[in-house]
Amino acid sequence: MAKTVRVALVGATGLLGRELLNLLAEKKFPAKELRAFASEHSVGESVAFGDDELEVEALTADAFAHCDLAFFCVPAKVAEHYVPLALQAGCLVLDASRAFRRDSRSLMLVPGLQSEALSLHRGLIVLPASASLVLLYALWPLHEEATLTRLVITALQPVSLAGQEGIQELEKQVSDLLNMREISCQCFPAQIAFNVLPVSGELAQDEYSTDEEDFACDLARVLDAPDLAVTANCVQVPIFYGHGLSLNVETSKKLSAKTARALLSQAYGVRVLDNPGATIFPTPIDCTGEPEVFVGRIREDQSRPAALNLWICADNLRRGSALSLCELALELVEGGYLEREWDRQIWEADHA
């Protein structure tokens, strides 16, 4: 591939931005130019891109004037403001935030599962939430075989979902407790070290959290299953990286554990690690730095006629976000979708 793509990466100094830069260099992404943007307090810093160092620039309204592709690795409020500006400048956007996940103008995709849909983009492609994306790799083959009807999800969420602040708070609390010092809580509402919090994400009016609501929206949208019943509980646990997802799956017809194991063993992006006799099953640590979604503890639900229990783990930062952004970008380039025109006027209302 010729190096012809001019790239902007918004949020280059965050956990996700740095991981994405590593992957773009590792995959030899064909960037003619790559500019790193972040908030004002990071301007002038350097971030690594392979053997090179990129100077961080201030994010401004005209930052996208000479870019073909923009990655957004920032909180939703930042994306809400700058994504429409990038689109109006003719820059195709890959957004990892939740800002536009429920916007019908966006296209939500999971790489490797929906490559044929890339031609339908209207300038903005969004990722599902990282936990939803991880689940979709495991759910896709089961849904194709037996149509999902109901999902009960318990998601054990790592502190890295809260960014560097979450990691630092866990580190500091562990150090303070082991040294008999009083702890403080800024990032999380209560002590996270050696503890489990029964909610992850901001609580909405119905007392479900934003993380929990993401599941129903994301899964129904990607699977094209508006009637799929989804209920979720997101739990904050004291680990740095890696999703742990306990899943109960109901289907329109019975799937045996043997059949499900065979389907998952052949599924794109999935590694089955399931040997109960030897107590072999995935854990978040096994998945750190790995590109696959690991599935184990595949069991038939003895209380329901057509249901399965699964345990799923994956690296939230790599598989759940950065690698997915990188793979989508490569698919866009290889398929010639960056050159596709779209109606920029549909985004003008956001910044009239």
Image: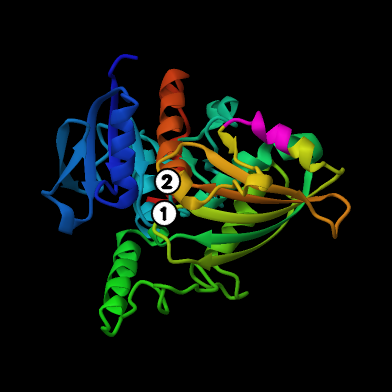
Q: Position of residue 318 (x, y in %)?
A: 41, 43
In the depicted structure, whether residue 298 falls above or below residue 188 = above
Boundaries of the magenta span: 261-268
**Circle 1: element type:** loop
Q: Amino acid at mark 2?
A: Thr
Residue 189 image-quadrant placement: bottom left
The answer to whether the residues at label 1 and label 2 have Cβ atoms under 8 Å apart is yes
Give residue 70's position: percent from left, percent from top.
34, 38
Quarter location, residue 341 = top left
Q: Gap in Å between the C-alphas at discs 1 and 2?
A: 7 Å
The residue under label 2 is 288
Kindly identify which numbered label has been placed on residue 241.
1
Whichever of labels 1 and 2 marks the residue nearer the N terminus, that label is 1
SS class, disc 2: loop
Percent x, y of residue 247: 67, 54
The answer to whether 130 is drawn above or below residue 51 in the figure is below
Left-right relation of 107 to 340: right
Q: Tell me, yes or no, whether the highlighted magenta stretch contains residue 67.
A: no
Q: Is residue 322 visible?
A: yes
Q: How many marks?
A: 2
Q: Is residue 80 left or right of residue 228?
A: left
Residue found farthest to the top: 2
